Image (tube, helix red, strand yellow):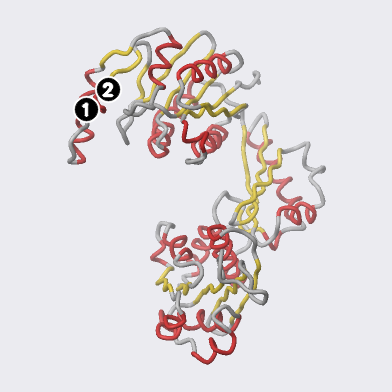
Amino acid sequence: MSDPLTIEIISIGDELLTGHIANTNAAWMADQLLQIGLRVNRITTVGDDEKEICEILRQAESRADLIMATGGLGPTHDDVTRTALCEYFTCKLVVNKELLEDIKSFFGRRGIPMARVNTDQARVPATARLLKNDSGTAPGYVFSRKNTTFYFLAGVPHEMRSMMARIVLPELSQKVQTRLIRTRYLCTIGIAESTLYEQIGGIDKVAHEVRVAFLPGFSGVKIRLSAEGENEAETEGRLARAADYLRQNIAPYVYSERDMPLEQALALKLSQQRKTIAVAESCTGGLLAHKFTNIPGSSNFFERGVVTYSNRAKIELLGVPASTIEAYGAVSEQVALAMAEGVRRLAKTDYGLSTTGIAGPDGGSDEKPVGLVYVAWAGEEQVDVNMHRFIGDRHSNKERFAYAALNVLRINIKATGEL
């Protein structure tokens, strides 16, 4: 097998350097390239400055076979990538009449007038091959020089992803000799990264077969295994042996060997079991319902979500006894259970799920600090409630609260293993 390509991703935009927008494009592109057997060697971010863009391109071209860049192709004054490309590749901007008609049609289909600045997007570098943008007005560009190929794509995520899926990835798969790289995930929930690593007992026994990466997030820790081989059987064999070894001591925490969020794994299990669920939320404010309804086909298992933020809502909508709230407080095991049972009874579903806690930054006490949450599950004959204490800001606490509730559901419907 020949030496692998050297690949670099360049993300262009001042907003990426100031932190106003997270650089999700580079991560998504790197993952998609890996799926077709191309591993990215370097990711660079540069602002909207022509000289800086040219300098970054010079550095990348000196060492890379393939350069993928996003951003700066829009119609406003700070979108300087096109003029930087003309400088770098020694060419002029020329009007592409077909592209101009496409841009006019784009606005016509949306029923809105086209701003004058959008016509400027039909002026393109003369030596570039254009990539059609079906989701927006900024086309992509391809340049080739000596041994390096350059792709320049729109920075708007859904536009970039469409261009990658429709054009770039198929082109690379056909034209470039890719390596056989396969990945597998062990998605876990309910265990911290350090504890997970310690419980595995180290990765020395599989390091010679696969690359192992621990990827923590609000939804748990994903262990990504990647392997390279001469053929499919060899590569999949390496992944299987490594996964079997790692699972030995962490099986209770693994909910899938596919890269998916917990809510998707639960959706599959609930649909397979033909079970229904309703949720009652206080501190998560509808986040559980949002996560479930993000899943296509959620109407098969998700009946309703109720946000009972106030004590009055808990009493009137869910039938939580006022005396229970008075005796134990709204953030309590007893109220969480009453909420789960109440929403299940109200919706006539197989399961009820609830959250009640203190997301912060205010509202905590020594007895009930910020980050405290009770999550409860109710079935036909059984109930379960868990208490957790998290440390974070309001947003991260709400995310962790939601996944703590989903984990209670997972445990009680036995949604572990490959789904």
Considering only vertical position in the picture, is 100 above or below 247?
A: above
Identify the residue at image location x=67%, y=48%.
223
Q: Is residue 283 left or right of residue 124?
A: right
Question: Which amino acid type is marked by label 2?
Answer: Asp
Quadrant of res 138: top left
Question: Separation of disc 2 and disc 1 at Cα?
Answer: 8 Å
x%, y% of residue 140? 38, 25
Quadrant of res 164: top left
> What kind of element bears circle 1?
helix
- Between residue 269 and residue 164, name the one nearer to us: 164
Quarter of the image with the C terminus is bottom right
Reading the image, the residue beneath label 2 is 120
> What kind of element bears circle 2?
helix
Q: Residue 366 — which label?
A: none
Q: Is residue 403 left or right of residue 126?
A: right
Q: Residue 116 — which label?
A: 1
x%, y% of residue 23? 51, 38
Q: Is residue 62 left or right of residue 112?
A: right
Identify the residue at image location x=55%, y=14%.
58
Question: Which amino acid type is marked by label 1?
Answer: Arg
Quadrant of res 182: top right
- Between residue 411 and residue 111, name the one nearer to us: 111
Discs 2, 1 touching: Cβ within 8 Å = yes
